[in-house]
Image (cartoon, rainbow, N blue to C red):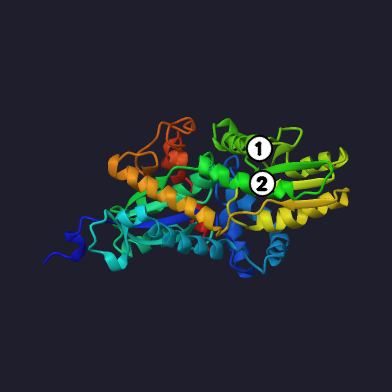
Amino acid sequence: MKSQKSMNTQKRVMIALYNMGGPAGQDEVEPFLRALFNDPDLLDIPLGGLLQNFVASKIINKRLEEVKTRYQHMGGGSPQLPITRGVSEKLQAAIFANPQGLNLFSSKSQYESPNPFSLAGVIPLFRYSEPRAKTVLQQCATNQIDELWLLSQYPHCARATTGTSLREIGLEQNSNSSLGSIRIRSFASYGDDPNFLELWTSRVKESWQALPEGRKHLLISAHNLPLSYVADGDPYPMQIRRTAQEVTRRLGLHEGIHWTLCWQSAVGPVRWMDPTTEKTIEELCSSGTEHMLVWPVAFVSDHIETLVEIDLEYAEMAKKQGVKTFSRVKNFDTDPDFINFLALQVIRAATDLLQCPDTPLLRDFNIRAAGPFCSAQPGGCLCANYYLSGRNGLERGKSFVRIDSESKP
């Protein structure tokens, strides 16, 4: 007798919101850092296969107590998991609240509906803390999921964000034959999506207009990237700059006069991009800037880089050097407008998938793009899986499996 699932032509789908993750408490800080700095996509050390673990241990030993103290400012751990859980729950509700979504997706209680997809859930997926790739893939296998759709919480593509997350997914699936039947798809990046740009434009405008009269400046701060990645053609800096330019153009703000793009959070013995956020703050202070507004352009949810590095450390630095007011454009977190934007991304991609199986909006994980230089392609960036599609891909990743396995808590 055939099972209910085998008689049903619906695709059982799980959507995973992927992000960096973070320690839930003080006892998880060290394992989190070990996973972080042992990742060659995040910190690419020369002769990394031999030196990665050694360099990671040196950095951790030097910074552990400092990092623990920084997490103490947030209650002991990162807010990434509760925020992403909140986004997951609200996104699932928003999909079903949309009339188009109701025609595309059925819920568990509507399994026999004629809709093409059965949405089993929307869940978090983290790179350096649980739930990681292995956990999520096993959950999919247990729930007889046909397709896992990966929706990035990084609006822009980078080897150190989207790339490393997708490499781990690919390696975990390839290492377990029982997971091979799960088809994995990745949504296109959305840093230059007009609706996403409008969301940021509204927030930046509100924060900019709230600044007092006087000499004011917008610091558009993104997480830094090693120069070696930029030389390899990583699309991240270009995508960040495009988001910055599009939003400031809408607001009538001019680079060098009203705003500066800068880079934060560089760690480790490699060369990083300039100017750094610290250097930019110093230069603006010395030139007489009275009011500073920081826009964390690369982040959609709060974590240590926003709540501690910007709100506390950079604020203190600026005020010690004479700045009268220092504020930040707030992240989206579980904002309803952002949730609705993500729901429309899902619905648009799912609709396109039914009409075009090779749609770039929801790309089959195993179809390789031509390489990392695809920001000019129609339908948004095709690089949500660019690292797997580039000249290194999974083959490069395999050489780091041992390091990565040793780094897992």
**Closer to us: 242 or 370:** 242
User: How much space separates mark 2 and mark 1, taking CA atoms?
Assistant: 9 Å
Find residue 85 and report its horizontal and vertical position in percent.
Answer: 50, 64
Residue that appears at 55% across and 50% down? 39
Residue that appears at 68% across and 58% down? 307
Q: Amino acid at mark 1?
A: Thr
Q: Amino acid at mark 2?
A: Val
| Quadrant for the N terminus in the image | bottom left
Find residue 114 and report its horizontal and vertical position in percent.
Answer: 23, 57
Residue that appears at 40% across and 50% down? 346
Residue that appears at 73% across and 38% down? 259
Name which of mark 2 and mark 1 comes first in the sequence: 2
Find residue 240 and report its horizontal and vertical position in percent.
Answer: 60, 38
Dot 1 falls on a residue whose secondary structure is helix
Residue 375: in sight, yes or no?
A: yes
Picture mark count:
2
Please indicate whether residue 129 sits to the left or right of residue 362 in the image. right
> On screen, 170 above or below 112?
above
Please indicate whether residue 292 sits to the left or right of residue 67 in the image. right
Local crowd at mark 2 within 10 Å, few (<14), some, or many (≥20)? many
Residue 41: in sight, yes or no?
A: no
Asked whether disc 2 touches disc 1, contact meaning CB atoms under 8 Å apart, the reply is yes
**Closer to us: 2 or 10:** 10
Local crowd at mark 1 within 10 Å, few (<14), some, or many (≥20)? many
> On screen, 271 above or below 350?
above
Q: Which mark identifies residue 204? A: 2
Dot 2 falls on a residue whose secondary structure is helix
The residue that disc 1 covers is: 248
**Which of the 4 image quadrants contains residue 140?**
bottom left
